[in-house]
Image: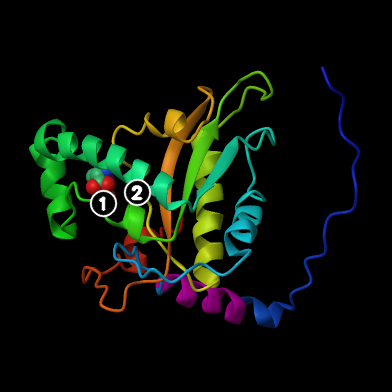
Amino acid sequence: MPGPVDRQPAPTYDVPAEEALPRVQELARDLARRRTIREFAPTPIPDGVLEWAVRAAATAPSGAHVQPWRFVVVEDPERRRAVREAAEAEEREFYDRRASEEWLDALAPLGTDWHKPFLTDAPGLVVVFEVHQGPDSPKPYYVKESVGIAVGFLLAALHRAGLATLTHTPSPMRFLGPLLGRPAHERPFVVIPVGYPAPDATVPALTRKPLDDVLVRV
Ligand code: IYR
């Protein structure tokens, strides 16, 4: 069993108290502007942005610090086409047969269907995998929680860079491992198309729950 790691001083937390509220307000208002985008322009992603967004994501906390994530960046058009074809085949089954009426009713306001043009329109995809125990990876803990937090960091980082994202979960998404050359102990978690919205992109006019519905003080 490995012993405890060395310890070092904690980083400084030196935001002055009077700046705390304006800072969190600025972030909250900026994140509130983020919307899931399904129509992308072909405009390229500026160099280095995906890599640095993955660096940001990979700073997330994780169970036992196992860091059970893998981010596969797919920019090659042929690979994106292959992902789209496989995803659309699964999604066609989902919408035509597998999804319950209840699930389809829940999706109806969003207007989604089996067509996934964003998988080839967006100039980049980040396919996020959970890393389970394998030849070079220890047993992870709280995998979904850890990877979910990392994806939150990734979406926030890309938003901060001015890029639009979509969290896409083809169902089932087993096909992604073989298609992207990942080993069996890496399991797909989410596909994130990244890019700039098409000039005529629209989003559903949704509202968010008021604070009273999401925050309880006890
Ligand atoms: N995977 C399908 C269905 C879907 C499910 C949920 I929950 C959504 O919020 C949106 C879509 C698809 O990607 O269309």
Question: Up-down: is 131 above or below 213?
Answer: above
Q: Residue at x 67, y 33 (%)?
A: 66
30 drawn magenta = yes
Q: Is mark 1 within 8 Å of ligand 1?
A: yes
Q: Residue at x 63, y 22 (%)?
A: 139
Name the residue nearer the viewer: 75 or 200: 75
Colour setting = rainbow
Residue 83's label in the rendered image is none
10 Å crowding of disc 2: few (<14), some (14-19), many (20+): some
10 Å crowding of disc 1: few (<14), some (14-19), many (20+): some
Q: Tell me if 61 is positioned left or right of 148 in this view.
A: right
Q: Tell me if 23 is positioned left or right of 208 in this view.
A: right
Question: Up-down: is 166 above or below 43?
Answer: above
Q: Tell me if 120 is positioned left or right of 16 in this view.
A: left
Marks 2 and 1, the one that precedes in the sequence: 1
Question: Up-down: is 51 above or below 203?
Answer: above
Are the residues flagged by discs 2 and 1 in contact, CB closer than 8 Å?
A: yes
Q: CA distance from mark 2 to mark 1?
A: 9 Å
Q: Which residue is disc 2 drawn over?
A: 168
Range of magenta residues: 21-32
- Type of secondary structure dominating the magenta stretch: helix
Q: Amino acid at mark 1?
A: Lys
**x, y (%) of residue 58?**
64, 48
**x, y (%) of residue 109?**
14, 59
Q: Tell me if 150 is positioned left or right of 86 in this view.
A: right
